[in-house]
Image: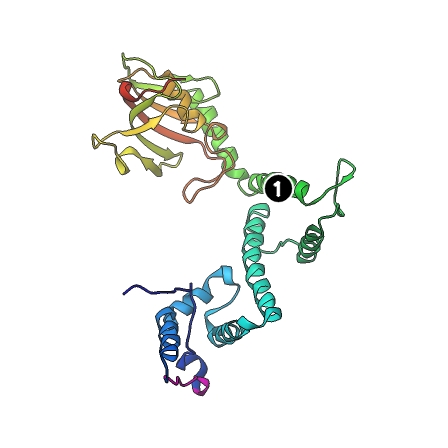
Amino acid sequence: MKKIFTVALAAGALMLTACGDNTPKPQLKSAGDTISYELGMANAPSEAELKMYLSDPRTGSDSAYIEEFMKGFKEAIQASGDKKKAAYYAGLQVGSQFKTTIQQVEGAIYADDSTKHLSMKNFLAGFKDGMGGKRTHLKIDGKLIDRQMAAMDVNDRINKEAAAAAQRKYADNKEQSTKFIENKSKEKDVKKLEGGTLYKVLTEGTGATPKDGQRVNVIYEGKLTDGTVFDASAQHPGPDGKSNQMVVGQMIAGFNAALKAMPVGSTWEIYIPYEQAYNDQQSPVIKPYSALIFTVTLVSIDEDKANAN
């Protein structure tokens, strides 16, 4: 039978290991008593699961504080009929969620410098002023802004600071990528596409060249300048078991530029400067400001599903 009610990481009964002799003894005298007890049991995490939850950096806690978790959990459950306490616990929950957001912003704008933090005092002041719906203390172009204007402006500010932080943190990678492209541009048989992407023809194709919006079948391998393979069509091939289907115009700029210049049947090695790749964006494998290398074979244009602009 499926659980009637589930609560993420809820614990309906105090754990013996956490609370010792304070563990409540159930009194199962009615159907409601039994439902209450079973509901707690059905939704309780194991002690290991609870420790893992408290160890998550997003909680701001530690696996050693199971008893404190249970104390807060018990108080929140028992406050269900007390509107004042319920509001307090709702504030705790929302505050915890905002804390995670704040930590994510800090990681972006300070490039993971753990010594720098946003001002909680200013955050709370802004939160309170925003609730009031008034024009507040921040001016843009000489005018006090309201909550809606702050919502429109804040992402631009975060992105600007994050980009500046990334440039500082990854300055060496940016310089190496720039030098790599400069050196490649001087090599024999390397040509340049509009936008700055370079390519070398390994096999000359004789077919048509695709246009924006057309679906193509491509065999490719993507590498970093140190030779690390970060993606390949072999990892997620299409129906033919070899090539990968993609739509021209929906890839990174340098890859799109190469596709639109390649005749079907061609195999090229392309060298994409970071500005035509992911620029200051980061992934688990690709650092910001990384130049990329792709070996690409344009197998075919899917004429049946073409959607040329």
Q: Position of residue 162 (x, y in %)?
A: 58, 42
Q: Position of residue 28 (x, y in %)?
A: 36, 83
Q: Is residue 26 on the magenta stretch?
A: yes
Asked where in the image residue 216 lies, by quadrant, the reply is top left
Q: Residue at x 31, y 15 (%)?
A: 263
Instruction: Assign the C terminus to one quadrant of the image.
Output: top left
Colouring: rainbow
Q: Residue furthest left?
A: 240
Q: Is residue 110 left or right of residue 4?
A: right
Inspect the image, locate mark 1, and give the three-letter code of the amino acid beneath it. Answer: Glu
Vertical position of residue 269 compared to residue 224: above or below: above
Q: How many marks?
A: 1
Instruction: Assign the N terminus to one quadrant of the image.
Output: bottom left
- In the picture of the structure, the residue carrying the numbered disc 1 is 161
Q: Is residue 266 left or right of residue 147?
A: left
Asked where in the image residue 140 lies, by quadrant, the reply is top right
Q: Is there any visible trace of residue 189 in the rendered image?
A: no
Main SS type for the magenta part? loop
Q: Residue at x 68, y 53 (%)?
A: 131
Mark 1 Cα shell of 10 Å, populated few (<14), some (14-19), many (≥20): some
Q: Is residue 286 left or right of residue 78?
A: left
Vertical position of residue 77 compared to residue 253: above or below: below
Vertical position of residue 218 compared to residue 110: above or below: above
Q: Is residue 84 on the magenta stretch?
A: no
Q: Position of residue 305 (x, y in %)?
A: 30, 22
Q: Is there any visible trace of residue 176 in the rendered image?
A: yes
Q: Nearer the viewer, residue 190 or 147?
A: 147
The residues colored magenta run 21-28
Q: Nearer the viewer, residue 180 or 41?
A: 41
